[in-house]
Image: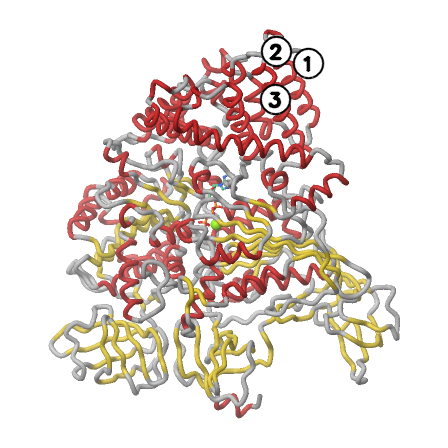
């Protein structure tokens, strides 16, 4: 495609520039802006109104001089060169190396926006992933190919949890460990968090399996808009062209959404809630929906994203819209954290929508579905009783309510609070049953008598 | 439209999912246009002097100013004829399986033009024997039939505006969908051919003879719906709820188990995997009413969240038009849309690009009107044409309120136009009480109609059981507030009993596990029997309490567990076992009663 070069701009506002009097420009096209004595900046055509071309500059417009710049339009959308060699490397959001090694040269390149997967080409994810964490494995099972965000609050140990997942989760089939890769998209991360992840990959020996795309808090917010797209383009290539099982980690979605809001304000679009643009749902969907499994490929993309809820508010547009798109969420709870419980997973608020088909006979164990249902139900009741006890005092509870209250306590202290220990699914299941043995059989309405006899034999014996 | 027109027509603005076009000598609202060299599909949605705005159903990347534009002379239409069922389409009725084959890609590419209906397939057409030469054929008349799927015989009907004298009709035989099967002579002597298919502009409701009152329930096999908040065939219901409250699962359940003849499932801006789930599961499931594979009566539209937003806007109309097509054949159709909020957001996004004045939360002023038009297309009707047919469309639509707040514009407007409201409650969902339909603020506007129907259908007790159970639940709610302050231990025994029975009802009746082999679908007889047993228990326990029996003994009865578990423990057709349970409950309570001077 022929390139077009133009000198000067007519408007500059925020990260947006407007160029007039140029024709033949394409919607969405990639461009580079040359500034005298400064590094070239990159951008994208956002809209074209007759002679006016509206452009987003990823590195912002600071120090751009009105007449002294030259814009080169590439006649195509932004593309990323992709190759298996990317594994083990560190790039910025534009795919330029940050590790001092040469750029990627490849015959293969991809449009970073991707295309929607045809629903008839998807394979419904069913293979559960053992993470070693009971609150996930038993209660909110992760499935290969799932998109599952972690809703966290400032200061909660979400990164430690991700670290554990990276360390422990068996995402690839055991026999083919080689075909496993992590794609990490850092969006507006602080240096501290970034260093944490770097260490994590080093310590877990996964550094040579990770592709990193890094946009730090100090980097341009506009560039943040492409970080997840570049990361997922790489993930798609590895998973769907090269048959890798990819764990994609994005952190932090909240920083991404704030950048999105800043750009939409500059473009003067009509805001919906809290100043976030009305198209944020579709925009986030264009990221999250890239996870999954497709026919004609042995690979998969499992997507885990950090999402810091502003003021711990789950109804804030960022977690809210995300929850409407992803296949569940893991929620971290501040009060559990303050009580020293790790991982502080809010088991009831969390959800894995793909769990139903990944568990049970032939997958995990036959008792899994009803056992987890019973644990949810009894724990939920136990929490009600705890709230009641806060009002009337624990002594005023009747016998049954006291037992349930205690059940909630031990559920949190013994079950959720597992620290960094690894529990196999077998161990998590058995521990679940041993918790249930604290309850009278009349409470066990979600598990069949056969299962009770099998897993709590002494309980089954004294009932008729 | 002339060729020179096309030569002059040019794109002048490209923004979001719309382009502006100048240079045509005439514009028609709603006309389908092909945009740019790739011929992306679009529709004219606004005209201002010599400038037309086109909403484009595909991504706009790569378009340039001055790119050409081609008019088609058609409005956005659905192809209607045999071959729709068991299929999955995108928001503008392109068949997704075909797209996959043609492009040999797992991803949806741009600029693909494929007809909704397969042109090559041959169908065995059986003519309507009553039609003979000279017969006056009018819109809606049945010309013959085609066995569309194992379950569904598709009536081939004359398109609504037909009017002519029959010149010829084909004998029984195999035809492609575009082959002429009927030849007519119009009043102006012109000849007209009718085929197995016709097209209909989706934004216009298909005509019918008249609307008639709804009169029977849609049986869904979901207890809280059938017994507490029923919906009539031809009725409308909204399913609002925050994320993860169970809207999609409920819609899957309705699509699976309802006694509708045809199901149109619209995945409008939701997850890809959910559509894959339906595609994977439905062919394996058997319709409990006909014993046939469910897929035979199902038609899917998938315009998932990352597919173009303009096509999402169209998908709702595409779906309802196909539903009307089956209604006009005389079927009861269930249309379920997940989620109308995503559709409203698409509307909002496009309105924003047109720089229309937003009213509430960025939504355009006509949001309410559009919703009204959509729900108006539901109902029970007498169709056009002969023979006499009645058909119906149910609309059950998910609403996804931001932050789960029901006062937001889409939920509030929807409430004005639907008669049934199944409000999903995130507190219930969080404790895994599913379906999380809240029994205190949900309602059905069809109770009286269905009560009448129940009386005629041998379910005389329906209204009474329902009322009794409701009363218990309502009292329970009041008591819960008190118990939260003083603890239930401090309540008198008869009030503790209400809490116990309400607990049995909630767990044993209202909760229904979609993933349980038995409980996923619950037949009416079993629903009634379950209510009967629970109320029996309540009645006996009340007498026991009056006679001084301590509540703790009643709580400890095995009957309590039986009542909570019979939904999953008793196979749906095993009335004998239900009767045995009834006996057991009788006996157990009598035994207890004998200690407290109570006799049956
Ligand atoms: N009847 C049911 N039986 C068992 N589980 C259920 C039932 N209904 C819902 N669930 C559980 O709730 C989860 C969420 O349900 P669903 O996907 O229908 O929510 P939703 O309201 O459609 O959410 P979203 O708005 O995000 O799409 C399911 O994955 C399932 O675990
Ligand atoms: Mg849903």
The image shows residue A259 at horizontal and vertical percentages of 27, 61
Residue A399 appears in the picture as rendered: yes
Q: Which residue is mark 3?
A: B537
**Label 3 CB, ligand 1: below 8 Å?**
no
Q: Earlier in the sequence, mark 2 or mark 3?
A: 3
Residue density around tag 2, few if under 14, some if 14–19, many if 20 or more, within 10 Å: many
Q: Which residue shows up at 69% across the image and 51% down it? A: B261
State the mark number for residue B593: 2
Considering only vertical position in the picture, is B283 above or below B21? above
Alpha carbon separation for disc pair 1 and 2: 9 Å
Q: Which residue shows up at 24% across the image and 62% down it? A: A93
| Front-lying residue, A38 or B318 | B318
The answer to which image quadrant residue B14 occupies is: bottom left
Q: Earlier in the sequence, mark 1 or mark 2?
A: 2
Q: Which residue is mark 1?
A: B600
The lab-note entry on whether marks 1 and 2 share a chain reads: yes
Considering only vertical position in the picture, is B335 above or below B190? above
The image shows residue A257 at horizontal and vertical percentages of 30, 58
Secondary structure category for the residue under label 3: helix
* Horizontal side of residue B519 vs B69, given as left or right: right
Viewport quadrant of the N terminus of chain A: bottom left
Residue density around tag 3, few if under 14, some if 14–19, many if 20 or more, within 10 Å: many
The image shows residue A439 at horizontal and vertical percentages of 42, 19
Considering only vertical position in the picture, is B64 above or below B126? below
Q: Are marks 1 and 2 in contact (CB under 8 Å)?
A: yes
Pinpoint the chain carrying mark 2. B
The image shows residue B282 at horizontal and vertical percentages of 59, 48
| Front-lying residue, B329 or A395 | A395
């Amino acid at each position: 495609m022929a390139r077009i070069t133009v000198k000067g701009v007519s408007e500059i506002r925020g990260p947006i520039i407007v160029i007039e009097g140029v024709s033949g420009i394409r919607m969405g096209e990639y461009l580079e802006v040359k500034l005298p004595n400064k590094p070239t900046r990159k951008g994208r055509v956002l809209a074209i109104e007759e002679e006016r071309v509206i452009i987003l500059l990823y590195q912002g417009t600071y120090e751009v001089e009105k007449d002294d710049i030259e814009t080169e339009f590439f006649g195509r959308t932004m593309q990323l060169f992709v190759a298996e060699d990317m594994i083990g490397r560190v790039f910025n959001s534009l795919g330029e190396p940050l590790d001092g090694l040469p750029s990627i040269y490849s015959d293969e390149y991809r449009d970073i926006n991707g295309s929607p997967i045809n629903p008839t080409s998807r394979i419904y994810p069913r293979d559960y992933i053992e993470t070693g964490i009971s609150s996930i494995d038993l209660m909110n099972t992760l499935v290969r190919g799932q998109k599952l965000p972690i809703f966290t609050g400032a200061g909660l140990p979400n990164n430690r949890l991700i670290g554990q997942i990276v360390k422990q989760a068996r995402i690839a089939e055991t026999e083919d460990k080689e075909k496993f890769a992590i794609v990490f998209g850092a969006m507006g991360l602080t240096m501290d968090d970034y260093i944490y992840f770097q260490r994590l990959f080093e310590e877990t020996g996964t550094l040579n399996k990770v592709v990193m795309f890094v946009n730090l808090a100090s980097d341009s917010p506009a560039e943040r808009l492409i970080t997840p797209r570049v990361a997922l383009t790489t993930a798609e290539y590895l998973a769907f062209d090269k048959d890798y099982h990819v764990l994609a980690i994005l952190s932090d979605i909240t920083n991404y959404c704030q950048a999105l809001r800043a750009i939409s304000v500059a473009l003067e679009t009509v805001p919906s809630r809290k100043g976030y643009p009305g198209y944020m749902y579709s925009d986030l969907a264009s990221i999250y929906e890239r996870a999954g499994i497709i026919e004609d490929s042995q690979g998969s993309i499992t997507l885990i994203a950090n999402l810091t809820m502003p003021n711990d508010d789950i109804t804030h547009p960022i977690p809210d819209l995300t929850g409407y798109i992803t296949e569940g969420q893991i929620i971290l709870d501040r009060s559990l954290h303050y009580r020293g419980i790790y991982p502080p997973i809010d088991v009831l608020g969390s959800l894995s929508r793909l769990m139903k088909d990944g568990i049970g006979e032939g997958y995990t164990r036959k008792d899994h579905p009803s056992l987890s249902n019973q644990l949810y139900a009894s724990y939920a009741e136990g929490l009600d009783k705890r709230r009641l006890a806060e009002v009337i005092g624990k002594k005023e509870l009747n016998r049954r309510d006291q037992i349930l209250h205690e059940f909630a306590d031990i559920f949190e202290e013994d079950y959720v609070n597992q620290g960094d220990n690894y529990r196999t699914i077998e161990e998590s299941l058995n521990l679940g049953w041993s918790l249930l043995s604290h309850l009278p059989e009349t409470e066990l309405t979600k598990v069949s008598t056969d299962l009770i006899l099998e897993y709590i034999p002494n309980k089954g014996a004294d009932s008729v | 439209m002339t060729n020179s027109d096309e030569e002059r027509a040019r794109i002048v603005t490209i923004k979001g999912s719309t382009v502006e076009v100048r240079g045509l000598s005439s514009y028609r609202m709603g006309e389908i246009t092909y945009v740019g060299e790739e011929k992306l599909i679009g529709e004219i949605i606004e005209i201002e002097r010599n400038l037309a705005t086109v909403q484009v159903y595909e991504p706009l990347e790569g378009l340039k100013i001055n790119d050409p534009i081609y008019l088609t002379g058609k409005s956005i239409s659905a192809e209607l004829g045999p071959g729709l069922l068991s299929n999955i389409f995108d928001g503008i009725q392109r068949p997704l399986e075909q797209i996959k084959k043609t492009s040999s890609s797992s991803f949806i590419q741009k600029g693909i033009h494929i007809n909704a209906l397969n042109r090559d397939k041959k169908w065995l057409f059986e003519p309507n024997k009553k039609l003979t030469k000279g017969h006056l054929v009018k819109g809606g008349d049945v010309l013959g039939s085609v066995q569309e799927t194992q379950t569904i015989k598709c009536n081939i009907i004359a398109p609504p505006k037909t009017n002519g004298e029959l010149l010829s009709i084909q004998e029984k035989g195999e035809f492609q969908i575009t082959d002429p099967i009927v030849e007519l002579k119009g009043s102006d002597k012109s000849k007209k051919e009718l085929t197995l298919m016709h097209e209909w502009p989706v934004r216009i409701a298909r005509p019918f003879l008249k609307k008639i009152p709804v009169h029977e329930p849609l049986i869904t096999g979901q207890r809280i719906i059938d017994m507490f908040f029923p919906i009539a065939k031809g009725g409308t219901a909204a399913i609002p709820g925050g994320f993860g409250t169970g809207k999609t699962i409920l819609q899957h359940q309705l699509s699976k188990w309802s006694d509708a003849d045809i199901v149109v499932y619209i995945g409008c801006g939701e997850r890809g995997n959910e559509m894959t789930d339906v595609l994977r599961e439905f062919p394996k499931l058997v319709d409990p009413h006909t014993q046939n594979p469910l897929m035979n009566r199902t038609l899917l539209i998938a315009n998932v969240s990352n597919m173009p937003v303009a096509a999402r806007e169209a998908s709702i109309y595409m779906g309802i038009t196909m539903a009307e097509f089956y209604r006009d054949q005389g079927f009861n159709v269930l249309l379920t849309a997940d989620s109308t909020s995503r559709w409203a957001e698409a509307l909002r996004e496009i309105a924003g690009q047109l720089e229309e004045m937003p009213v509430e939360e960025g939504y355009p002023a006509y949001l309410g009107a559009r919703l009204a038009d959509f729900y108006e297309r539901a109902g029970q009707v007498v169709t056009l044409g002969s023979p006499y047919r009645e058909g119906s469309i149910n609309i059950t639509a998910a609403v996804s309120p931001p932050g789960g707040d029901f006062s937001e514009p889409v939920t509030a407007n929807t409430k004005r136009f639907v008669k049934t409201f199944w409000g999903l409650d995130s507190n219930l969902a969080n404790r895994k009480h599913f379906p999380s339909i809240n029994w205190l603020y949900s309602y059905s506007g069809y109770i009286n109609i269905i009560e009448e129907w129940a009386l005629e259908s041998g379910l005389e007790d329906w209204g009474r059981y329902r009322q009794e159970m409701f009363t218990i639940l309502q009292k329970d709610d009041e008591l819960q507030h008190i118990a939260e302050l003083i603890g239930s231990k401090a309540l008198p025994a008869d009030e503790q009993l209400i809490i116990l029975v309400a607990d049995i009802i909630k767990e044993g009746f209202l909760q229904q596990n979609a993933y349980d082999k038995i409980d996923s679908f619950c037949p009416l007889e079993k629903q009634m029997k379950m209510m009967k047993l629970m109320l029996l228990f309540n009645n006996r326990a009340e007498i026991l309490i009056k006679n001084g029996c301590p509540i703790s003994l009643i709580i400890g009865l095995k009957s309590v567990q039986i009542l909570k578990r019979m939904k999953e423990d008793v196979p749906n057709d095993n009335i004998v076992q239900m009767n045995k349970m009834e006996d057991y409950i009788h006996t157990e309570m009598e035994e207890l009663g004998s200690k407290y001077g109570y006799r049956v």
